[in-house]
Amino acid sequence: MSDHDGHDHGHGHSHDDGHHSHAPEVGRSNAQVVFYAMLLTFGFMLAELVGGLLSGSLALIADSGHMLTDAAALALAWAAFRFGRRGRDAKRTFGYMRFEILAGFVNAIVLIGLVLWIAYEAVLRLADPDPVLAGPMFWVAVLGLLVNVGVFFMLRQGDRDHVNIRGALLHVLGDLLGSVAAIVAAIVIWFTGWTPIDPILSVLLSALILRSAWSLLRDSLNILMEGTPKGIDLEEMRRDLRRGVPGVADLHHLHVWSITSGQPAATMEVRLAEGADPAVTVQALKRRLAEENGIEHATVEIDWGTGRSHCPLGGGGEPEPA
């Protein structure tokens, strides 16, 4: 629904009255599946951390760090399901949708710190190897593998088309590899006594954590900084709207950002072609944004003058020559 409000400065303004979600509808069963998978993963992560400390295995500690990324991903998915159902209020006009982004940013910082600590410990152990209890290490890693298999099949009971469920499944698959690596290290130590395999594999596992953490940090920081969402080219979008929407003479002060993951929003100022109907043009612009760019929350302001008003935010590109 669009409103057309008059302003003292001679501009018209139109925006959507509601907020739209691009994620599939989430049922309570999805939230429950993710919640129980999160509890199981987090619980065994603690057990694996204790097992790694007692057995002296850095690989187990690294794998517990990777399980922490799984638990964090599941926690964020569950939080998105729970907080996403909360309505907006006078203080939070977009509701609590950014909660998962803030949590993701903090999670990424913690994980990067964990990777640095594991790398430091690995260097020390390569220089001066510590004894590793291969037996306890092996059984803890086997249990970790079984837990990851259980969580994987648990998540498959949810809606696999949902972005959060798919992301959690990918995290668990990565952690399966971590458990296998810890099992291999335990077997090598058991039969050969070559303990450097433990810090070597811990560094490889840390690389998996670092890749996930860096991606999470980059994406969450981009959203928090109101950056342009991935896959959207502002100049290409502006040209498409200018040429593809009847009634648009020019378009400037274009800003596109994400409210939360998967929910882009846009604002722009439009100068109408002679004789164009403002309401029809605005609706056509919003329809084009939704169909071509997945943007369903857009604010469109009509420039009724011959010049452009000052945009304190900057950006958006200069008008193309006629």
Image (tube, rainbow, N blue to C red):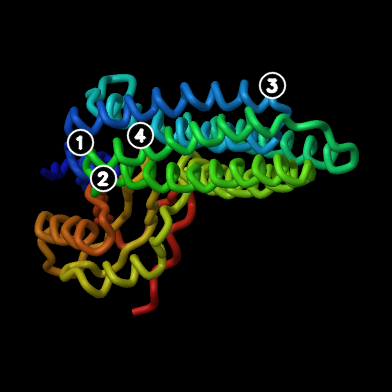
Q: Nearer the viewer, residue 287 or 37?
A: 37
Q: Is residue 309 above or below residue 164?
A: below
On the image, the x and y values in percent for residue 298 come to 26, 48
**Label 3 is placed on what type of residue?**
Leu
Residue type of the residue flagged with mark 4:
Ala
Is label 1 in a helix, a strand or a loop? loop
Closer to the eye: label 3 or 4: 3
Q: Which residue is disc 1 drawn over? A: 26
Of the image marks 3 and 2, the number of the one nearer the N terminus: 3
Task: Indicate which disc residue 162 carries.
Answer: 2
Q: Is residue 122 above or below residue 88?
A: below
Type of amino acid under label 2: His
Q: Give the CA distance from mark 1 to mark 2.
A: 8 Å
Q: Which mark is residue 77?
A: 4
Instruction: Report if the CB atoms under discs 1 and 3 are less than 8 Å apart.
Output: no
Q: Quadrant of residue 88?
A: top left
Q: Which residue is mark 3?
A: 54
Q: Could you classify mark 4 by the number of other residues whose Cα lies within 10 Å: few (under 14), some (14-19), or many (20 or more)?
A: many
Specify whether 225 is left or right of 53. left
* Labels 1 & 2 near each other (Cβ < 8 A): yes
Label 4: element kind: helix
Give the label, 1 or 3, closer to the camera: 3
Q: CA distance from mark 1 to mark 3?
A: 41 Å
